Image: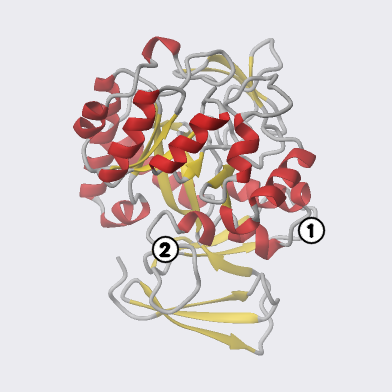
Amino acid sequence: MSGGRPLRLTGRDPATGRTLRVSVEDGRIAEVRAMDEPAGLWLAPGLVDLQVNGFAGHDVNGEVDETVVTELVHAVWRAGVTTVVPTVVTAPEERIRAALSAVARARAADPLVAHAIPYVHVEGPFISAEDGPRGVHDPRYIRRADLDEVRRWGDLVGMLTVSPHEDAAIDLIAGAVRLGVRCAIGHTHADPAQITRAVDAGAELATHLGNGAHAVLPRHPNHLWTQLADDRLYAGFIADGHHLPADTFRAMLRAKGIERSHLVSDTTALGGMPAGRYRTAVGGDVELSEDGRLSYVGTPYLAGASRSLADGVATAISMGDLTLSTALRLATANPGRFAGGRGVLRPGAPADLITFAWRPGDTTLDVRTVVVAGTPVVTG
């Protein structure tokens, strides 16, 4: 991490349009000063992605070792993500623990990787086995809630997605929270009362709300309304233009409120890859279209996500009728609250910064410079 000469980065403030100069010392922001001189690029905190299964061919749910994890981190840096939470999905316990071990070794080998990865998100295996809610999770490995298994995973797990459709899962949430693990509701067929009990037990997030659900639900009541209405829950959304229609995204965002919302990419290893047909460890034969839709071959069904969080910010602007500043907040400060308060431009905060080009109508942020803990890792 940066401990040498001070670093200065200049760019336009997305909130005001004024030029800012950020000074960095010892890996942290030392000063943020408004300047009169013009700047061509925007300046913002680095993006914070709480749900990354893989990217650019690197997969934490396949044959994973510390090299794969390190290369994944480097790949998301290039896409503007300075804080990444690797997400391990439903699998046999030994595979989950092997992935966690690989992440731990990668963090131990490189302080910048350790900074970029605050913890691991385990999505499953205690989720609904029903078609629709389980998504692409392998039904062979979905199992009943087991707090002892969570204990065996170790301290690197900081977030757990669980379906509270039975008492054991609600008890698991209470136990996991006592262990210091944040719990999220997702991939569920729980009824509204069970959702409320889960939040009472300590669940505080909703995983990619609006997805991982039955294609057809009762008009009301259903678990989506309950998650939207409960102000104790923070909600993640996939704004890739495929997982949620624009009107659904806008309505959900307004119901939950900007303050309680954040974006996730939920990318698989095919994120950032060329269009074409692929065979994946999770999902089998899939097709990636030119517009980033990842589908099962020969079907209209989604097989995961492929668009980066930088794409998601740009898409959220058009889908949600948002300003650049608000869309960035959904991918920086709001998810950053679950990563030690990252994603902010203020003195004392970690110097995780990006500069980028963007104009209205663009489908992504054109990332030019990336600084992680005060160290430039991408320059352009």
Residue 162 is situated, as x and y percent measured from the top left of the image, at 42, 30
Mark 2 residue type: Gly
Residue 259 is situated, as x and y percent measured from the top left of the image, at 59, 59
Q: Residue at x 66, y 77 (%)?
A: 39
Q: Characterize the local packing of mark 2: few (<14), some (14-19) or many (20 or more) Cα atoms within 10 angstroms.
A: some
Question: Toward the viewer: 125 or 238?
Answer: 125
| In the depicted structure, whether residue 270 falls above or below residue 353 | above
The residue pinned by badge 1 equals 360
Q: Earlier in the sequence, mark 2 or mark 1?
A: 2
Viewer-nearest of labels 2 and 1? 2
Q: Residue at the bottom extreme?
A: 36
The residue pinned by badge 2 equals 341
Q: Residue at x 32, y 51 (%)?
A: 113
Q: Secondary structure at mark 1?
A: loop
Question: Toward the viewer: 293 or 202?
Answer: 202
Mark 1 residue type: Pro
Q: Residue at x 67, y 29 (%)?
A: 221
Residue 284 is situated, as x and y percent measured from the top left of the image, at 51, 13
What is the quadrant of residue 229 in the picture?
A: top right
On the question of residue 268 being in view, the answer is: no
Specify the label residue 21 is tagged with.
Answer: none
Question: Toward the viewer: 290 or 302?
Answer: 302
Cα–Cα gap, marks 2 and 1? 29 Å
Residue 4 is situated, as x and y percent measured from the top left of the image, at 29, 77
What is the quadrant of residue 322 in the picture?
A: bottom right
Q: Residue at x 66, y 90 (%)?
A: 36
Question: Toward the viewer: 297 or 155?
Answer: 155
Q: Characterize the local packing of mark 1: few (<14), some (14-19) or many (20 or more) Cα atoms within 10 angstroms.
A: few
Q: Quadrant of the C terminus?
A: bottom right
